Image: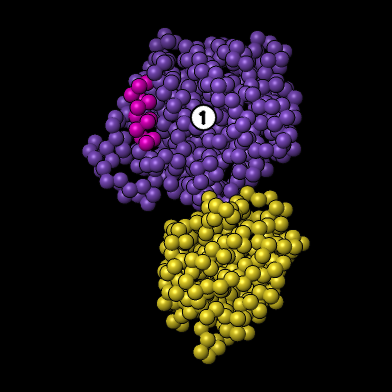
Chain colours: A yellow, B purple
Amino acid sequence: MTPAILTLGAARVRVWQFGAPHPGQPPLLYLHGFEAHPGPAPFLIRLARQQEVWAPEHPGYGESSGFESIHDVTDLVLHYRRLIEHWGVGRVDLMGHSLGGMFAAEIAALCPHLVRRLVLVDAYGLWLDAHPAPDPFVMPAEALARAKFADPGWAGREPTTLPEDAAARAIARTGNLAAATKFMWPVADRGLARRLPFVHAPTLVVHGAADGLVPPAHAEAFARLIPAARVAMIPNAGHLPMVEQEDAFLAAVADPPR
Amino acid sequence: MKFHWFAEVTYPHLPADFRARGTPSWVTMPASLADPVKCGEMYRMFIRLMQQADRDGFDGLAVNEHHQTSFAVTPSPNLLAASLAGSTQNAAILVIGDSLALYNPPTRVAEEMAYLDCLSGGRLIAGFVFGTSMDSTFAYGFPPVEVRDRFHEARQLILRAWAERDPFVFNGRFTKLRYVNIWPRPVQAPPPIWVPGSGSVETWDLVTDHDYCYGHLSFSGLYSAKPMVDAYWEYVAQRGGNLNPHRMAFTQLICCADTDAAAEAQYAEAVRYFYRNNVQDPFLAPPGYTSLKSVQAIAANRKKGESKLSPEDRVRASKGEMSFWEYDEKGYIIAGTPERVRQRLRELATDLRIGQLIACLHMGDLPEDVAAHNTRLVGREVAPHLRDLWADQPDHWTPAVCRARAAELVA
């Protein structure tokens, strides 16, 4: 599966495309999490049976460029607005994971005309004093594995676009995380809570019940703040339920938010 | 060569097993380990030592900024600098430096440095620093990818605030001010500017293009610095920059005593304390703080120096596991009689083309009387013998008034 490179203003965007257009079905735009784009992950390929899936890589990640002109989350929203308008499909269904969840919620709040349905998966973007998220940037590998997965045996086995060679992988991951700090450092809250009431799209908030990075209480908070939202908690899954519990995840999102 | 007196203001009363506890000495350093009364005693000691350094003929008194750490308990260097500016006569007040991104708005730096320049009668050296990752990104919370942009914008604002005679509008990305018009302006127009770095090529561009004094402020000595500093000078030459050695500052721990045996007896424990209790992990290298280009250049330069200083040496040094003379042999410290210290400093400064030596004459939990003796020996029996080094080249990077007074004292 070879991703396409498209040019968007001054930015180069690497995009994976899965499946073919379904009549009467808008495409699903998938926004990846804070560590890396997952590449042709099984869950994306299976999602593409229902509708065409587009999975772009964020500015500053991997081979996508244009990060210099993203000064804040508004610029990031406009980047994706431009991408959706470039495709000329009207509305999309929007699914965002982790940091991509923060982006998806921002897009849905600020550009409601572009989003038919919204799915947030273990999304960053809120801060709850009673349920503080740990600092993902200083965690040793072992602690990160325990926080990310219900079964830490998954560590290093998730689908990813990071290179296999350890040194190259460390460099590429550091580059990705550097971009993430723009939105997640020192606290992954850029004011999204004030904007969530402006989300029009029916929303499904999916969350791994054992997520040690974004505490599950954040899912409840998202659902309280978004006018039409419900929560689907995935048991035995951490921060990547679509990887760790692929079937349960797909079953949850197959019942679309209304 | 110029001699500047410096010490990290290290808290000297940590428990002996601190390192073994496995907690960092930065950012999340337990505050319960600091006795505020003892901090006050420590501050008064450093003021006394630096006032003495002024009398002993040092060219500058260096102060720096760190946050949330026992390694250097100087959250505002300008406060210590103010204590010195009003109570010393000749030496430059070397603020090395203010972490520009951390002052909001950055005109605060322009104001406080101007105050220091006025109070000292034009003796300020203005050091602008990015701040360590521990300071700027963890303690002060700025996203690592923004620190450099914030630094550069602040630097431009400060320089304009010093230079322009009329109020002006500053519409930056991070700072917006309708009326910039600081009171007072500095005596010097402007003070000499120093920018230390740790090998980032972006900083090399900055200091070369603006003819600032660069500083390699490590505590690992000649062999650690050699590949990096050589690469720096090559870079300057290629870019057509100024190769004057007075544009290069370097920090060196010095342990001077009447005999070599006395040096070991007086300094060995303090040196080990200094290295052992500086625990930066996991706050040293957040993603985005250093560019990929610079990470790779720094790693390559480290590799080049491995024949003289292996990665294992570095680990042992940082844990306080070297013997006193091994620290000396590996370049971390320069120890012994004034004669030996002179000779080794001459080799160091010649090898690295250093015109501004930042001599670290107190370290760790060293007693005040030893540091005072160190100051006297280096000021009176070492520095005068090294004044000839680079004397043929002009020094535009120390305040004119300090250079004039040093010349008067020699005459």
Q: Place residue A61 in its image quadrant.
A: bottom right
Number of callouts: 1
Q: Is residue B164 magenta?
A: no
For mark 1, does the 10 Å Cα neighbourhood hold few (<14), some (14 to 19), or many (20 or more) residues? many
Residue B229 x/y as whole percent: 57, 36
**Residue positioned 33% across, 48% down in the render:** B176
Residue B262 x/y as whole percent: 70, 12
Residue type, numbered disc 1: Thr
**Residue positioned 48% across, 22% down in the render:** B61
Q: Nearer the viewer, residue B377 or B78?
A: B78
Residue B326 x/y as whole percent: 73, 26
Residue B137 seen in render? yes
Residue B21 x/y as whole percent: 72, 35
Residue B3 seen in render? no
Task: Name the side, left or right, on which B118 lies relative to A256.
Answer: left
Could you tell me which chain the residue with mark 1 belongs to? B
Above or below A228: residue B306: above
Magenta stretch, residue numbers: B108-120
Image quarter where the C terminus of chain B lies is: top left
Above or below A242: residue A46: below
Looking at this view, name the residue that lies furthest to the bottom. Answer: A23
Above or below A199: residue B358: above
**Residue positioned 60% across, 46% down in the render:** B285
**Magenta part mainly helix, strand or loop?**
helix
Above or below A250: residue B357: above
**Residue positioned 39% across, 41% down in the render:** B104
Q: Secondary structure at mark 1?
A: loop
Q: Is residue B112 magenta?
A: yes
Q: Which residue is mark 1?
A: B74
Q: Nearer the viewer, residue A149 or A174?
A: A149
